[in-house]
Image (cartoon, rainbow, N blue to C red):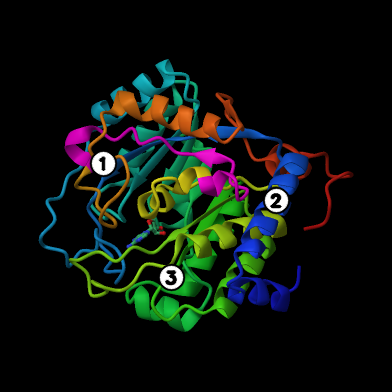
């Protein structure tokens, strides 16, 4: 699909176009990754952040937020409970917490990995040496969203980061043989259909294993307070286009999509997503990981999260999988013998 076609679809307000797109995306999902929906239990283990991104409630300037850091024992206990509930991927996410040493992060990864699960780390931009340490500690996957491919918009929204640095991190993660995830927000102030088309084409160019697409939701304690939220249909279109263009990637039905529409996650699954992320963060910390307001499931008890999500998945007619669900690209071509490996 070329850039202009993507732009035309994003600009088309007809409801029929979304239905057609979803049908096409579901057919491609079935063909390329099957009709299973994979579960990733997420533990948001620290809300400290040294960055000041304009859109995020965890930004360092948000003095209203009470900060927390879970201990490795607490994190391990959460992961153990999840493993007992048959979840086989644990996502360890935090703000860009400069107070966490690489030794501490490495121990956390190793302790969780010992539970015989796939480990995904999402702690932002770190050095090549740090990424290597975490890989050696047992991390399988890494999530680092680029948020927007519009470099001017990126610079405005992430004043103390750089687009080039972020791209370099994604490159390092790939070199280190991680399964690599990235993603974007839809509805950022100043974002255009052209830039969303570029985002989707960049997903393909980066040969990502996992791609998260969710709505931007303005947080009251940030400079973007009061900014409007995009209609959920725009998010669903971007999800469907991402599936159609990237074909065999893992795409979560994001919690943010479930936060702007009570049926948002189910609708994202029907737009081509194939991953759901139950929140394993202990209830006393959940409301403090307030990246955006109105987050779905914040007051839910941890043990209620999984059955709720399982029944949501089943309501779509898709099958819940308790497998690890490694990237098809990863177990396939990228790790094939050199003679059969396609040129990247
Ligand atoms: N609305 C929606 N998503 C947000 N994120 C950060 N702030 C917001 C917001 N206001 C997303 C970003 C980030 C992820 C952890 O949360 O995509 O990468």
Please name the residue that numbered disc 3 is placed on: 187
Residue 175, how many percent across, how many down?
62, 53
Could you tell me which secondary element the residue under label 1 belongs to? Answer: loop
Please name the residue that numbered disc 1 is placed on: 298
Q: Is residue 252 visible?
A: no
Mark 3 vs 1, N-terminal side: 3
Q: Find out whether residue 273 is within the magenta segment.
A: yes
| Mark 1 or 2: the one toward you | 2
Could you tell me which secondary element the residue under label 2 belongs to? Answer: helix
Binning the other alpha carbons within 10 Å of mark 1 as few (below 14), some (14 to 19) or many (20 upward) gives many
Please report the residue visible at 43 percent of the width from the left and 76 percent of the height from the top: 154
Relative horizontal placement of residue 175, taking residue 245 as reference (left or right): left
Q: Can you name the residue that lies furthest to the right here?
A: 339
Q: Find out whether residue 131 is within the magenta segment.
A: no
Mark 3 vs 2, N-terminal side: 2
Relative height, residue 34 to residue 55 (above, below): above
Determine whether label 3 and label 2 are within 8 Å by CB: no
Magenta span covers which residues?
A: 267-286
Pick the quarter of the image with the N terminus. bottom right
Where ligand 1 lies, by quadrant?
Answer: bottom left
Could you tell me which secondary element the residue under label 3 belongs to? Answer: loop
Residue 317, how many percent across, how many down?
61, 32
Q: CA distance from mark 1 to mark 2?
A: 32 Å
| Mark 3 or 2: the one toward you | 2
Task: Tell me which corner region of the image, top left, top right, bottom left or bottom right, holds residue 78.
Answer: top left
Binning the other alpha carbons within 10 Å of mark 2 as few (below 14), some (14 to 19) or many (20 upward) gives some
Q: Is residue 18 visible?
A: yes
Determine whether label 1 and label 2 are within 8 Å by CB: no
Please report the residue visible at 59 percent of the width from the left and 25 percent of the height from the top: 323
Please name the residue that numbered disc 2 is placed on: 23
Foreground of the two, 61 or 27:
27
């Amino acid at each position: 699909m070329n850039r202009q076609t993507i732009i035309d679809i994003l600009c088309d307000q007809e409801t029929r176009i979304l239905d057609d797109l979803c049908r096409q995306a579901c057919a491609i999902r079935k063909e390329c990754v099957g009709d299973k929906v994979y579960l990733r239990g997420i533990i948001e283990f620290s809300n400290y952040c040294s960055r000041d991104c304009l859109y995020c409630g965890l930004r360092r300037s948000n003095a209203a937020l009470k900060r927390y850091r879970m201990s490795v024992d607490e994190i391990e206990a959460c992961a153990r409970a999840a493993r007992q509930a048959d979840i086989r991927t644990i996502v360890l996410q935090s703000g860009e917490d400069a107070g966490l040493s690489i030794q501490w992060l490495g121990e956390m990864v190793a302790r969780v990995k010992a539970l015989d699960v796939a480990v995904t780390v999402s702690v932002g931009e770190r050095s090549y040496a740090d990424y290597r340490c975490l890989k050696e500690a047992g991390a399988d996957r890494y999530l680092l969203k680029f948020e927007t491919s519009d470099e001017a918009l990126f610079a405005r929204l992430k004043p103390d980061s750089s687009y080039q640095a972020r791209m370099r991190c994604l490159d390092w993660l790939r070199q280190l043989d991680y399964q690599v995830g990235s993603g974007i927000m839809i509805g950022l102030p100043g974002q255009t259909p052209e830039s969303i088309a570029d985002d989707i084409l960049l997903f393909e160019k980066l040969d990502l294993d996992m791609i998260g697409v969710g709505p931007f939701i303005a947080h009251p304690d940030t400079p973007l307070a009061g900014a409007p939220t995009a209609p959920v249909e725009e998010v669903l279109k971007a999800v469907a286009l991402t599936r159609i263009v990237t074909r065999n990637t893992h795409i979560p039905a994001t919690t943010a999509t479930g936060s702007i529409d009570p049926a948002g996650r189910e609708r994202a699954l029907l737009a081509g997503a194939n991953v759901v992320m139950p929140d394993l963060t202990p209830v006393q910390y959940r409301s403090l990981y307030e990246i955006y307001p109105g987050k779905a499931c914040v007051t839910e008890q941890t043990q209620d999260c999984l059955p709720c999500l399982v029944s949501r998945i089943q309501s779509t007619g898709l099958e819940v999988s308790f497998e690890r669900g490694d990237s098809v690209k990863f177990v396939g071509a990228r790790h094939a013998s050199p003679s059969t490996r396609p040129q990247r």
